[in-house]
Every structure is written in C-alpha cells, then in structure tokens.
Image (cartoon, rainbow, N blue to C red):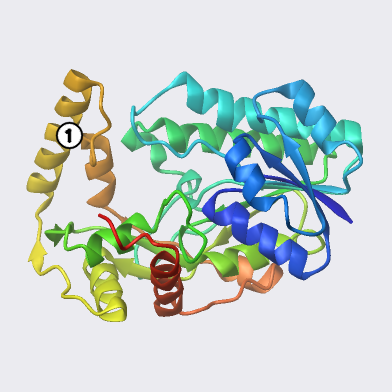
Amino acid sequence: MTVFLTGTSGLLGSNVLIELLKRNYQVKALFRDEHDARQHQHMKDIEIFMGDITDAQAMMRGAQGCDAIIHAAADTGLWPARSPQYVATNVQGTINLIEAGKKAGVQRMIAVSTANALGFGTKEQPGDESTPPKFKQYGLGYMETKHLAQEIMLREARNGFPGLVVNPTFMIGPNDHKPSSGRMVLAVYQGKVPGYPVGGKNYVYVGDAATAIVNALDKGNIGECYILGHENLSYQEAFTKIANVIGVKPPQLPIPPVLTKAFGGLGTIYGNLTGGTPKVSYKMARVSCDGHYFSAAKAVRELSLPQTPIDTAIRECFDWFKENGYLSDE
C-alpha cells in the first residue's frame, strides 16, 4: 500500500512516517520546504513530493497512485486569533485532499483534527467523542477551522467517502524539529516557567498517536472521530512531572486566573502594537485557566491506541533535544 502523507516534517507527521516505514508501507511524503525535503531524501521507501495543501491541482497529482491519505498538515497558529490563512490551510486544504482522494480512488483517508474540536470535561467526567464542543467561547481560529474541517470530512464520509477523523490531545515526544509542544519541556528546563495556571489538559506520547493513526488504515469505523490521548494532568502536575523527569526544580507558584488573564492581556496589547507574536495572548490565557480533560477509551478499544506513560514521552523528548543540540543555546 502507498500512503500520501501530509505534514511530514511536523512532530506528529515525522513520527507517523517512522511508523509507516517500520511496517513496510510505501510513502509519498508531501513537503513544502526544500530544506525539510532534503533531510528526508536519503530514506528508503519514500517518494518526495513538493507542494502545498492549499494548491488543489498539486494535491490531485500528489494523491495520484496512492491507496490511502494521512492528512496531518495544519496551521496550528494561535496568533493572531483569527486569520484567513487558518481557513486556507485547515479548511480548504482538507477539502483539496478529500477531492484528491476521490479522484485517486483511495481506500481510506485519515484526517488529523484536534481534541479541541470536541468537547472537554473534568477529570472526574472527561470529555469524549460525543461531548458537545466548547471551543467557541475562546474565539480562536485554529480551533474553529479544525472543527469545520472535521465536520466537512464527517459529512463526506456520510456520503460514501472512506474517511475518518483522529483527534490528538497534547502530544509530547521525539522528532520535534520546529519545536512545537516540546517548547514546554524546554521552558521548564531553562527555568522560564515562573508558575502554573489553574487549568490543565490531556497528554499523549506522540509515538502512541502515530501508532493509532497507522492502525486506522485498516481499523476503526468510517465517519467517526477518535480521541488520541492518555493522561489528564493539571498544569501543576504536568510541570512537576517534566521537572522530575529532566532533573530540575519544578515551578512552585500558583498563578490565579486574574493574573494569568492580565498577563495574556498585556501580550495581546504587545502583539497589536508591534505586530510581533506574544508568548501568551489574552485568549490563550483564558484557555489555560480551564481543565481540558478527555477520555481516549474509544481509540484504545477500536484503534489499539497504546498508553505509554507520559514520563517516557518527556524523557524521549528531552533526550532528542539534547542529542540534536537544542539545549546548547536558549
């Protein structure tokens, strides 16, 4: 089977690529950046395809001759809160891949969404695939466009297209080249986390998410969503776990919501006045004050999602950063 993979250079996509090759799939890997493509050109069983998911004709050519599509590319930006680019990449890009999949006659398409496109819950009653979405209260275009793309995929599946959706929570692990979620690990290591907000989230080892996604090529049900997650941790618990694993002092200061939001408000003012990207905006600060907790029971049951301890995910993330020179400079 040949798989057309988007988002290959990202944290999740790079781990999906490793899992596909481990299982002897042929991969046509989409790259937008020539530098990223050159780093992969030596790998066996990979066909490099240059293009952008916003280019519908390029995606038609990319999917040609492929048996399946794994669509992991996305614009995950949180600043500005809304942007036409989020629509172009997350919504139109997904539509382009669906149409390309139809023309190529793929057997299955797996669209990577986000758990934030579903409804979160508490630790005692975590959200699942049936929980009504709650993202609208935050006004973040990333969440909104990922939910819209997800709904388009599910609608197409109801009309006969062989697609399903996976919804990863916060992924941690190796091969975080950019870096993305690993910035949290780096910040704790560098002592840049002064305290912790009152909220929390669900965490998953990126290798487990990649395993479940490749499993979904022949497992799971068409037209359904699957939360890929594991441990529900408050920010205090997460920062303490990170610090303990990498051997530094954990943040000790609880930050009340009023101060968290005030700091985010200053970030928004900075971004609006300078055109720069704030570390935290007001809307991002609001998210950190809530507990975004999920259950991955359905994916464990139907996609054989592994449940690797988050301590392992943190250790592999940190070791990868160390081995690749990310700790030498702040």
The quarter in which the C terminus is drawn is bottom left
Residue toward you, 263 or 296: 263
Residue toward you, 317 or 156: 317
Residue 244 versus residue 29 in the image, above or below: below
Residue 170 versus residue 299 in the image, above or below: above
Residue 135 versus residue 245 in the image, above or below: above
Q: Position of residue 195 (x, y in %)?
A: 13, 61
Mark 1: secondary structure: helix
Q: Which residue is found at the position 25% from the left and 21% from the top?
A: 275
Quadrant hosting residue 306 = bottom right
- Identity, as a three-letter code, of the amino acid under mark 1: Gly
In-image side of 136 versus 235 (left or right): right
Please count the marks in the image.
1
Q: Which residue is found at the position 27% from the left and 66% from the top?
A: 234
In-image side of 232 versus 37 (left or right): left
In-image side of 242 versus 317 (left or right): left
Q: Which residue is found at the position 77% from the left and 41% from the top?
A: 157
Residue toward you, 269 or 319: 319
Neighbor class of circle 1 (other Cα within 10 Å; few <14, some 14-19, many 20+) is: many
Q: Is residue 170 visible?
A: yes
Q: Position of residue 210 (x, y in %)?
A: 63, 63
In-image side of 158 versus 118 (left or right): right
Quadrant hosting residue 304 = bottom right
Residue toward you, 304 or 60: 60
The quarter in which the N terminus is drawn is bottom right
Q: Position of residue 49 (x, y in %)?
A: 75, 38
Residue 29 versus residue 99 in the image, above or below: below
Residue at which label 1 appears: 267
Q: Position of residue 33 (x, y in %)?
A: 59, 36
Q: Is residue 226 visible?
A: no
